[in-house]
């Protein structure tokens, strides 16, 4: 588009109002998507912040208290100030007590948010998320990569035209559908086969989650494999290597950065996925590394509990904190994947 | 030596093909299971009546209407913004300017944010910040109207989630419009905006439509972002205004399968609802695929 810009300066077009409005409106609107990313950062973190800065929370409550009295002008000044004072001191004490208990709690190994003495230990949730993600990726990624290798290197055009769209179609499955299938069919199937105690557990959740991981890993890997320059494969074949030797020792190594990125994206998808794990993992916040025990992930915790919490409560803030952790983690994974692919692949194939 | 090489070759091809056909087999298994489980219950009455008897009988009409309204409002907001952003990225932006990089970065990041985080954002920003702010201004904070979950906030949250889908699809199409067309228009004395409006846009209609359909397909199936921004378990009436809550197909499946007091009795309804949702997303995705195929053909020509 650079040439266009030069053209306009060469022609020295006079100022044109509709043109000016159009260009700046377009600029402004496209800025919105950027603004919202910032806003997501700001607002998800903002709601999580009070945990770390108890003072701010106290002030916020004070502010709220004073604001709320605006509507009560029928009260006499004296009565108003009395009520005000009473409410304020009570809730401020509450808030301080609440927070003091929770910060210590965050690193604990118990998640019991709804009890007389709430415990907000994030550890079982983090372990839960990692466990389910690991199962999903360990199971899903190898299958997806092998399948991608098959479609990119061995399959005939006809078979390729069946397999590729079918697997891509799996990406279009709403996650609640996969969750439902896991809950109703897969859980029973696996239990009958392995004979474990709990019907819904980390293993079922992980396998179900791999159905969401597979299409991503497959698509990205397939892209990477088929973007390996034809020159390389032809050189290998003409040296007398067989088709499978070329695929395994030339094409696959050349596409390794893409495969790596595919796995990272798969991890990100698995880590953030909510509905599948919410429906298939049993949702008990146990701190264990057992394969067949129920587990509660971070995303499922938000999904299950957010609808019931009181706005501004510590529980509410902790759920936002979990959301922030999810956000940062997936953000970093995506950034690494993109950065890695861009640098490695570009270098390898010379600016392609 | 030759034999060993041959056997290894068979092994490699064998194991990769098993992996590929295994995935395809699983997909077919899921589809067949859901179709067989749900097809028996689906009839006109199921699609056009409300749930009855504590949601253990009756149809899913309110959930269908809620889903349709949700994605409709989502598209009305999201598609124009996405299209304009795509126009900016492909027509106006110089690839090195800071704004371009920021917008691209934002689009890539948006695509990777977990959907549940969008839900949190919808709650923290749209409901607690914008909604409560609107209530304070409009009614002095006496009446709670906008500061609670409703269909508008859920739609806006979803439109944000599907923004990258629209942008990527539209941008791809705009770039496939031949340069000759643009240059011919500019050479005839049309301004840049005139060229975009009269030449580029009419030639990109398919892409905008594809983007919209893909976004709708994605939005119709998402449950996590609307969990606490507006969806309701059961409503006796259809949403009548933007500040009403709504029912949703995906959420209906989730609730019926996990929180209903008699999960076994409603299994048929769950299957049928899942089937409706799956068919809906498939129709949308297939029409998007078809349109995209038409666009690709033009690019090659």
Image (spheres, helix red, strand yellow):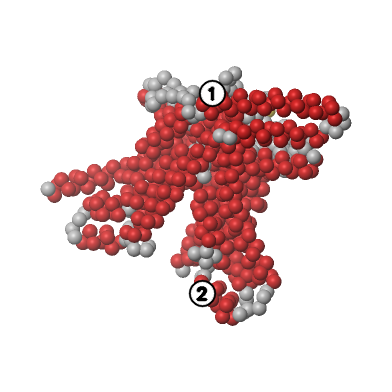
Packing grade of label 1 (10 A; few <14, some 14-19, many >=20) is many
Q: Which mark is residue B207?
A: none
Q: Position of residue A178 (x, y in %)?
A: 49, 36
Left/right placement of residue A260 relative to residue B238 reads left
Of the residues under marks 2 and 1, which one precedes in the sequence?
2
Residue at point 53%, 53% (across, down): B106
Q: Position of residue B181 (x, y in %)?
A: 55, 73
Residue at point 60%, 25% (across, down): A98
**In the depicted view, which residue is nearer to us: B221 or A78?**
A78
Q: Position of residue A255 (x, y in %)?
A: 32, 53
SS at mark 2?
Answer: helix
Packing grade of label 2 (10 A; few <14, some 14-19, many >=20) is few
**In the depicted view, which residue is nearer to us: A231 or A129?**
A129
Q: Position of residue B46 (x, y in %)?
A: 64, 34
Residue at point 54%, 74% (across, down): A4
**In the depicted view, which residue is nearer to us: B81 or B143?**
B143
The chain that hosts pointer 2 is A
Relative to A16, residue A159 above or below: above
Any part of residue B249 in sight: no
How far, Cα to Cα, is label 2 from label 1? 62 Å
């Amino acid at each position: 588009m650079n040439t266009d810009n030069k053209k306009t300066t060469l022609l020295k077009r006079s100022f044109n109002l509709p043109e000016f409005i159009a260009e700046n409106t377009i600029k402004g609107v496209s800025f919105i998507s950027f603004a919202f990313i910032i806003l997501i950062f700001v607002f998800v973190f903002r709601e999580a912040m009070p945990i770390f800065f108890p003072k701010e929370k106290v002030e916020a409550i004070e502010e709220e208290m004073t604001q709320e009295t605006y509507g009560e002008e029928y009260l006499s000044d004296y009565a108003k100030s009395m009520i005000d004072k009473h409410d304020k001191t009570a809730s401020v004490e509450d808030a301080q007590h609440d927070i003091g208990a929770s910060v210590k709690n965050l690193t604990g190994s118990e998640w019991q948010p709804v009890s007389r003495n709430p415990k907000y230990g994030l550890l079982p949730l983090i372990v839960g998320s990692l466990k389910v993600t690991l199962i999903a990726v360990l199971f899903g990624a190898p299958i997806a990569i092998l399948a991608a290798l098959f479609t990119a290197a061995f399959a005939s055009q006809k078979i390729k035209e069946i397999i590729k769209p079918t697997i891509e179609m799996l990406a279009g499955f709403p996650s609640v559908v996969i969750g439902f299938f896991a809950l109703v069919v897969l859980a029973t199937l696996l239990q009958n086969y392995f004979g474990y105690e709990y019907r819904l557990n980390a293993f079922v959740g992980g396998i179900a989650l791999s159905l969401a991981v597979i299409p991503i890993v497959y698509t990205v890997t397939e892209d990477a494999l088929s973007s390996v320059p034809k020159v390389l494969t032809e050189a290998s074949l003409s040296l007398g290597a067989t088709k499978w030797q070329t695929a395994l020792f030339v094409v696959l190594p050349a596409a390794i950065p893409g495969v790596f990125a595919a796995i990272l994206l798969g991890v990100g998808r698995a880590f953030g996925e909510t509905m599948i794990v919410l429906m298939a993992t049993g949702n008990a916040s146990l701190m264990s590394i057992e394969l067949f025990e129920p587990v509660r992930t971070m995303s499922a915790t938000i999904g299950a509990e957010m609808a019931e919490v009181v706005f501004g409560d510590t529980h509410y803030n902790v759920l936002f904190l979990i959301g922030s952790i999810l956000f940062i983690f997936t953000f970093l994974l995506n950034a690494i994947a993109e950065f890695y692919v861009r640098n490695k692949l570009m270098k390898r194939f010379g600016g392609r | 030596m030759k034999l060993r090489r041959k056997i290894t070759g068979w092994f490699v091809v064998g194991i990769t093909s098993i992996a590929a056909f295994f995935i395809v087999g699983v997909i077919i298994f899921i589809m067949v299971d859901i179709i067989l489980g749900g097809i028996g219950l689906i009839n006109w009455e199921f699609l056009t009546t409300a749930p009855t008897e504590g949601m253990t009988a009756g149809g899913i009409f309110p959930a269908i209407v809620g889903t349709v309204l949700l994605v409709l409002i989502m598209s009305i907001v999201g598609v124009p913004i996405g299209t304009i952003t795509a126009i900016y990225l492909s027509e106006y932006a110089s690839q090195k300017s800071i704004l371009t990089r920021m917008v691209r970065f934002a689009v890539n990041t948006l695509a990777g944010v977990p959907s549940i985080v969008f839900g949190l954002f919808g709650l923290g920003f749209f409901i607690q910040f914008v909604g409560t702010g609107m209530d304070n201004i409009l009614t002095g904070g006496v009446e709670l109207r906008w500061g609670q979950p409703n269909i508008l906030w859920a739609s806006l949250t979803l439109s944000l989630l599907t923004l990258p889908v629209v942008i990527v699809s539209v941008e791809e199409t705009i770039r496939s419009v031949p340069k000759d067309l643009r240059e011919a228009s500019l050479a005839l004395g049309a301004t840049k905006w005139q060229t975009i409006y009269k030449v580029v846009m009419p030639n990109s209609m398919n892409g905008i439509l594809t983007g919209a359909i893909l976004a709708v397909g994605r939005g119709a199936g998402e449950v996590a972002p609307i969990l606490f921004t507006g969806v309701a378990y059961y409503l006796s009436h259809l949403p009548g205004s933007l500040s009403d809550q709504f029912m949703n197909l995906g959420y209906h499946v989730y609730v019926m399968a996990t929180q209903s007091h008699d999960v076994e009795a409603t299994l048929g309804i769950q299957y049928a609802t899942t089937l409706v949702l799956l068919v809906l997303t498939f129709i949308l995705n297939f029409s998007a695929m078809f349109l995209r195929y038409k666009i690709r053909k033009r690019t090659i020509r």
